[in-house]
Image (tube, grey):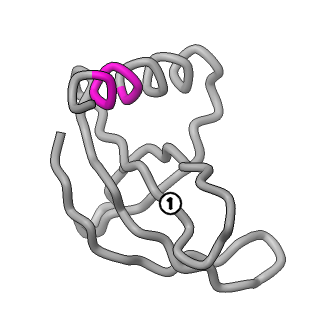
Amino acid sequence: MTDRHETITLIDDEGNEIEFEVIATFDIEDREYAVLLPVNEEEDEAYILKIEYDEDGNMILVNIEDKSEFDDAAAVYEAIIDEII
């Protein structure tokens, strides 16, 4: 797991810009994931997104559509957090 603690701005479905802190990245086999926490939200709900790359090598964050894949990513992240705490 990598702690980056950088911020990024994403645009939601309604066109609103939301600033997130990248609190961690980690790999599962050949897939990469990022854990994001909204900067200006009162809730501490983190989001796990898959990291993909376009043909130019630019990073793209995408929702995890497959429930099994999401459950695997969430379980790995929770295990990492449990190790740290």
- The quadrant in which the C terminus is found is top left
Tell me the residue at 30%/32% (across/down).
31
Q: Give the mark count.
A: 1
The residue pinned by badge 1 equals 37
73 on left or right of 39: left
Q: Residue flagged by tag 1: what amino acid is it?
A: Leu
Seen from the viewer's position, the closer of residues 28 and 3 is: 3
Q: Position of residue 38 (x, y in %)?
A: 56, 67
Q: Residue at image x 36%, y 42%?
A: 33
Residue 82: % across, % down: 32, 23
Question: Quarter of the image holding residue 76?
Answer: top left
Above or below 59: residue 79: above
Q: Mark 1: few, some, or many residues within 10 Å (few <14, many ≥20)?
A: some
Examine the image and state in which quarter residue 59 appears: bottom left
Q: For residue 75: magenta? A: no
Rendered location of residue 26, percent (x, y): 25, 38
Residue at the extreme front of the image, as rendered = 85
Q: Position of residue 44 (x, y in %)?
A: 59, 54
Question: Looking at the rendering, in which quadrant would you find the N terminus?
Answer: top left
> Which residue is the extreme one toward the right?
14
Look at the picture and state if 7 lies above or below 30: below
Q: Which stretch did the figure color magenta?
A: 77-82
Magenta segment main secondary structure: helix
| SS state under label 1 | strand
* Residue shown at the point (22%, 23%) measured from the top left: 83
Q: Is residue 78 left or right of residue 32?
A: right
